[in-house]
Amino acid sequence: MIALLGLIIGVAAGLIIEPEVPDSMEPYLPIAVVAALDASFGALRAYLDDIFDDKVFVVSFLSNVIIAALIVYLGDKLGVGAQLSTGVVVVLGIRIFSNVAAIRRHIFHA
Amino acid sequence: MIARPPFDKRSQADRRTTSSWELLEQVSATSLDEDYGRVAARRGAQGKGSRRRPKLLAAIALLALGVLIAVTTLQTRSASPVDAQERSSLVSQIHDREADISRLANRNDRLQTDVGTLQSSAEQLGGKGDTLLDALNQARLLTGAIPATGPGLRIVADDEANGQAGSGGTILDVDLQVMVNGLWQAGAEAISINGNRLGSLSAIRTAGRAITVNYNSLIPPYVVTAIGDPDTLEAAFAETPGGQAWFDLETNYGIQFDMDTVDQVTLPAVPSERLDTQYAQRPSEKP
């Protein structure tokens, strides 16, 4: 419950405060969001599997976001930023889909 | 190991079909972080039971996720109007430039037509200018404003060899007037006496003891040069009253008189002071 509250407050705060994002950070925001979503869905699945752990979630969340942004940053420096972004989004997307499928199985027992 | 590969019912042969399949399956199989399972197993081994309630840390992480989502959404939304604005401004710039192009093309056509018109009128004016210049040069030649050159006749006349002043053997202004008159009659087109070109204002008259032309005193012998048809000028002059009078002078008074046809002779221009008019004016109507 407290986690859902955190998510809602975060969205509200972001919409209200509208923090200025430095231009150099801007290209990595969407990738960071996808990586964070992946970590969050993984956490939800772990929660339903009864194996959730706060520390593991936070560590995986941070490492997901940072590594995804780093990969894209490196790709930009090497001139293959667009391709690497696509690769990262594909991998994270597959993970999100399979996690959501597991969550669905839990909820509907199917 | 609690994490379960979702596709574990597949046979080994199927799994080995392609490496890309393996990659995809591996991604799917490890979609849940193994750490969850590991930590839970350790916890179970220590008998603490699974700690399944999310706490503050998780809430903070999700709060970060919420902020990220909100910021990214705002960023994307605020960027798109800028893009649209740029696109529409570019489109309007293109339209402006196209209008410029058609306007300039029209202007180009107009200017080309102008150039054609001006060129043809310049050609007409050029022809007219040449005609006028020809007419002017002809007039200057006739009035003696410019030197004249051509074939003609040279007459050398002198007083009687050892005659005395006052006797019949001296050439008078009248004699020269008669000769010039005869030359004009014979078809001469330009005449000079001792290098003094006869213009329309030139008088041949006696001033004191000498004959003057264009206010220049002449010293005998008198050399009269006329430009005209070299084949007929001499014979025609001989038939005029002027020519007859001079043959008379030669016969009866011993005056020396020689005529020679010349192929090429140049007569000087009339002095400019003998080309001025003070009262004679062109009639106001244009020629």
Image (tube, rainbow, N blue to C red):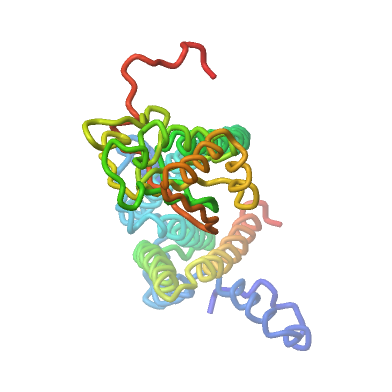
Residue B270 visible to an observer of this rendering: yes
| Drawn side of residue A6 relative to residue B235, left or right | left
- Residue A53, image quadrant: bottom left
Residue B92 appearing in the image: no
Residue B144 is left or right of residue B128, and the answer is left
- Point 60% across, 52% down: residue: B230
Residue B213 position in % (x across, y down): 32, 36
Q: Residue at x 41, y 46 (%)?
A: B255
Residue A96: where, in percent of width, then height? 57, 61
- Between A4 and B200, the one lying in front of the other is B200
User: What residue appears at the point 44 percent right and 33 percent down from the top-left corner?
Assistant: B143
Q: Quadrant of the C terminus of chain B?
A: top right
Image height check: is B278 above or below B57?
A: above
> Horizontal and vertical percent for residue B211?
30, 36
As drawn, is B20 to the left or to the right of B131? right
- Residue depicted at 54% across the width and 64% down the height: A89
User: As rendered, which of B85 and B35 lies closer to the eye?
Assistant: B85
